[in-house]
Amino acid sequence: MKSQFVLVIALFFIAGAYASFLPDWTGFYVVLGSGFSLSLAVPAVWRLGPKRWVYLLATLIAVFACFYVKIRTPQPQVEDISKYAPLSNAIVRGQVIEAPSLTRSDRAKFLLEVKEINTSGKLNLKDLTQPPTTNPSNPSNTEAKPDESNKFVAASGKLYVTVPLIEVTGLRSGQAVELSGRLYLPNRADNFGAFDFKSYLARQGVFAGMSGRSLIEKGDAPSFGEWWFVSRIVRTHVMGAGVPEGSLLSSLVLGSRAVDLPSDLKDAFIQAGLAAVLAASGFQVTLVLGAAIALSRHKSLKLQFVIGSLCLGGYLLLTGASPSILRAVVMGFGSLIGLVVQRRSRPIIGLIVTAVLLLLYQPLWIWDLGFQFSFLATFGLLTTSRSISERLEWLPPTIAELLSVPIAAYIWTLPLQLLVFGKLSPYSLVANIFTTPLVSISTYGGIVSGLLGIIFVPIGAAIAWLLYPLLHWTIDLAQWVNTLPNASTSVGAINLWQMLIAYGLFMAIWLVPWFGKMQRWMIAFVLACVVLFVPNAIAQANVFQVTLPAFNDVPIMLIKNQNQTVLINSGDQQFTSFTLQPFLQKLGVNRIDWAISTDTQPDVSDGWNTLISGPVEISQFRDISLGVTPKPYQNLQQALANAKTPLASLKVGETLTINNQVDIQLLNQSPDVLKIKTGELTWLLLPNADPKSQQAISTKKDLLPKLSANILWWTGGQIEPAVLQAINPKVAIASATSVVEAMVNQLYEAKIRVFYTGRDGAIQWTPDKDFHTLRDQQDTRSPI
């Protein structure tokens, strides 16, 4: 009964924390109404469960959590650095909060605690080249004579900084620096399903960023600190095992946040479903605590507690206070306390209490994926691994236990993974099973190697050298898994209700004795799988959706209808990697049936190359080419040939019939004019709507009647009256950061609805919802 009480209270607290992010007072009313409803309904159905007063108390706690999170949500202060943004040239002084790390664009990033800002962006060269002068009124006091036009003013807040990698050589946490560069406000996500950088920074209390050009260290780097131990351990591992094996070993011991792993290695492990290998978590903490207790087993209980606490505290300092590490460390301390008082610990209650304590410490961690996955995986191990092991009794006990751990973690993290990513890694279970012994031995060896390396690097490096084969096999296994057929399968992101029902069934299997029998357990599990996968499969078979992503001034369109997918243009490499591919993944797209390119510029070729090298297959590729192509586009042609993807050029008047609702026709070439039919709507694309091109169009009398369309889709420039009259659109959509003001006025006067991606973000059309934009969707949600 006590465990049920704690579980209900904790779940209501977490639910209240989530509800706090609903706009205005909605969360309060939802929590209050849901709590009272459950207090009436659940005790009547579940008579052996908690009493009604428990649910009423839990409702009050949920209300408290709702208000507590709102109070603890960071807001910019009066002197916050964000009030000066945007600013093209600024100089900022402050203190480095965390050690720099590497971005995917090979720049360094870190957080800065701001002290001062110079908005003129100019330095007084005398301050840098001349020594301080003596103040005659106070000979003991020395001060510089700054240029009054270049004054620094007090500022506060945190700043997200990126600078060239060479600028941060030797930079440490706690060091004072002076930065010059462009100050900006982080943007909201411009595309459906894209990473919301603004909200991510806001949850850390950061409301401005700086793209730095130069950095000046204003003080000596700290001579000693946790960074010294981390750098010593990493140096030891790399010296012994080389790169990337040594970097992987450091990541196994310290976590990927403390070590800059190569991006391609990270991607290989993530795609293979082995991301947990790279994150310091409960596994490493268990090894550290187990080793500490084993070494001190002949000592008194109090001394074991002290040694274990020191080891846990030291490991926490080395790895950083990430949610998964804090969860494991707090639970480790609970185990130590249980050891001292000689009471058997209750790990499930300990895990739940730990979750609540961490959310009291930092409530916004409730949105941290590392926090969520870590707790779900641990909860699965505690509640399900033993049951799975018992059902594998036909296997040797060691193998059954080895299999039960990754299976339990996989089952409990799967619904969240589908909600966030919409992706399955079919071979991840097998990969985890085979890598577990390799990782276990490597982690033990890496801890020993790191400790010896702190004392004398060559000795620790010798241990790391012995671990090289295990690390190399682990990397090879991850890379080999990614070469298997359908190694990464997109099934589409599920809805919140699907995830909640699945977890409700999992909880029922754990709590309700009726499910104890094998047949009933299997029925509940199969039902959970049906809830997770069947609705998406049905929806994808019937979806009709047109999406215009926001990317600079490039027209991009994704059409999904009757299991057919059409992509017109792909953007550049960065857009394809970080926006387009995740969006396709969440839609459940594993194959693009028709890819159409209206441009042959190098950046466009890079985007298509990135897409071809990814998990999404391209069945047919069409371009609009006059026969002369630049070298980067020739590389794309070679990549298509290697992938055995048919390539052809669209001819004027040719129509691509996708199905009975979608077709695409090239009306004109040089300038290019594309007509797209989606159901009852017709779109006219003018990808190069410059004045010269439009004049060429307006002179073609046989072309003008063919331009008539419901929707004008162009890149934001002025449209010639003759061309606009020929099109006669009801809606105008510009794939552009801005639209010529005269053009906007002209369209409004003609009573034409106007959208453009620079203002509205991504734009989407469906038969039932008509046109809706990303900004419409975001404006109905809380800014955080």
Image (spheres, rainbow, N blue to C red):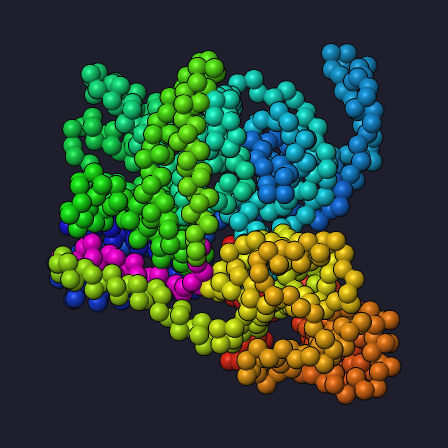
Q: For the point 56% across and 31% down, which residue is it?
A: 99
Quarter of the image where one finds residue 370: top left
Seen in the image, is 221 located left or right of residue 380?
right
**Quick check: is 512 in the magenta stretch?**
yes
Residue 622 picture location, percent across and down = 65, 68
- Label count reads 0
Magenta residues, as a range? 488-513
State the residue in front, 681 or 716. Answer: 681
Seen in the image, is 473 located left or right of residue 731?
left
Quarter of the image where one finds residue 567: bottom right
State the residue in front, 711 or 743. Answer: 711
Seen in the image, is 671 located left or right of residue 503?
right
Asked if residue 397 shows in the view, the reply is: yes
Most distant residue in the top direction: 140
Seen in the image, is 527 located left or right of residue 481?
left
State the residue in front, 591 or 552. Answer: 591
Asked if residue 25 shows in the view, the reply is: no
Residue 397 picture location, percent across and down = 17, 40
**Quick check: is 550 in the magenta stretch?**
no
State the residue in front, 106 or 703. Answer: 703
Q: For the point 74% across and 85% down, which residue is it?
A: 706
Q: For the point 67% across and 68% down, which residue is it?
A: 648
Q: Is residue 108 above or below residue 637?
A: above
Quarter of the image where one finds residue 541: bottom left
Q: Mostly what secondary structure, the magenta segment?
A: helix
Residue 681 picture location, percent across and down = 62, 83
